[in-house]
Image: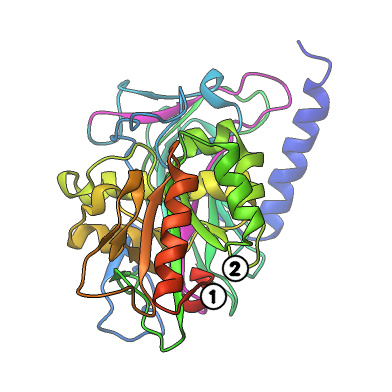
Amino acid sequence: MSTRLPARLSALAASVALLTALAVPAASADPAPAPVPAPTGPSAPTVNLATNPGFEIPAPSLADWGSIPGWSCTGGPAEAAVTTNAPHSGTSALTVTPAGADSTGECAQTVAVQPNTTYTASAWVRGNFVYLGATGTGKDLPPAWTESTGGGWQRLATRFTTGPNARSVRLYVHGWYQQGPFSVDDVRVDGPAPTLAVAAASVPTNDKVVFFTVDDGWQRTPEAERFIADHRLPITTFPLPMPAGTDPDFFKRVTSVPGSSIQDHTVSHSDLSKLPLDQQQVEICDARDAMTRLFGTTPVVFRPPYFASNADTLQAAANCGIRTVLTADADFSWGASNIWHPGLLQPGDVIIMHWTDTLAADLQRALAAADAAGLKPAGLVDYLR
């Protein structure tokens, strides 16, 4: 037996006592009360905002090996895995086996929320000492928990109302030190459906500005980096998580000009119009989380690969806290100079380019086109607020 076990059991006893004192009951298998309607009005439908709630969605291509779509687990694939062993519903569930004396096997996800709004979080769990809760709500929230599910599935539920500044919460489930494996399935965060993201190809403005955007991130050249620095160009870049994670310092440098930002472009560069809403949500939310983790700022703009999207894309993006789904109205990639409206560039136009070996020349050509129209590059996010 580990020498840490007595201390862990003592901590477990203290935790149980604290939770009991806080009058947080162990959740039962009975249905939880219906969510309280949001202040946005009774017409707002209630939806499940959790990403990959039933652990049924396969990991997208280019995702980290062993990752669980929509979720981040502290122990990684050494602890957490999607299994088909007696799920609560569907074909699979999450099973976590804490690997060491210092692990509770926590798995979590970020859920976009609205301020001053009530939500109900719930999950079906199996195992001993399993906890469900949320942080970042704006108020202290003790978790729902159960001492034991007796070998079967049991529903945990907790309700919270967000504070005036809350835009996202961190939903978590975990076990307890050296209390064995636990399983989770059918997670829900029930609340009002967010307002759909806005689809746009340009930004309405009378200012004499244009917006340079650069996608993907596979080919990062010193010439492009030098051109951006020499001309003090504010750019909005939409990198994929894999190249961004390979060379995050590069993206930090090329977005150091005021007005620049790093936004969301999916995990795997898939055609979202061919995916159902829940898979689109995984692509967008997981890329959002990767950009937030790498660069410390949460994306609010999403560019669909190939400009391919549908109504589900606007809903999936909104579920991930994205406000704008952006395409473009000019393309200066790979030597092109395509403006998809008559005449010169116009105020508010968005130009798409890509991180390729031609980018330095593409930027030069785009800058010349902006100059010819009497326009200057500006920071995109500054104009979307």
Q: Secondary structure at mark 2?
A: loop
Who's the residue at 46% across and 73% down the image?
114
Rendered view: 99 above or below 131: above
Magenta part of the chain: 91-120
Horizontal and vertical percent position of residue 325: 33, 63
> Are discs 1 and 2 less than 8 Å apart at CB?
yes
Residue topped by disc 2: 259
Of 318 and 354, nearer the camera is 354
Task: Give the residue type that dot 2 points to.
Answer: Gly
Name the spot of residue 45 as percent of width and height, x first: 26, 73
Indicate the secondary structure of the residue bearing disc 1.
helix
Few, some or many C-alpha atoms within 10 Å of disc 1 (few <14, some 14-19, many ≥20)?
few
Left or right: where does residue 177 sit relative to residue 330?
right
Count the marks. 2
Q: Which mark is residue 382?
A: 1
- Residue 297 appears at what percent x and percent y? 60, 57
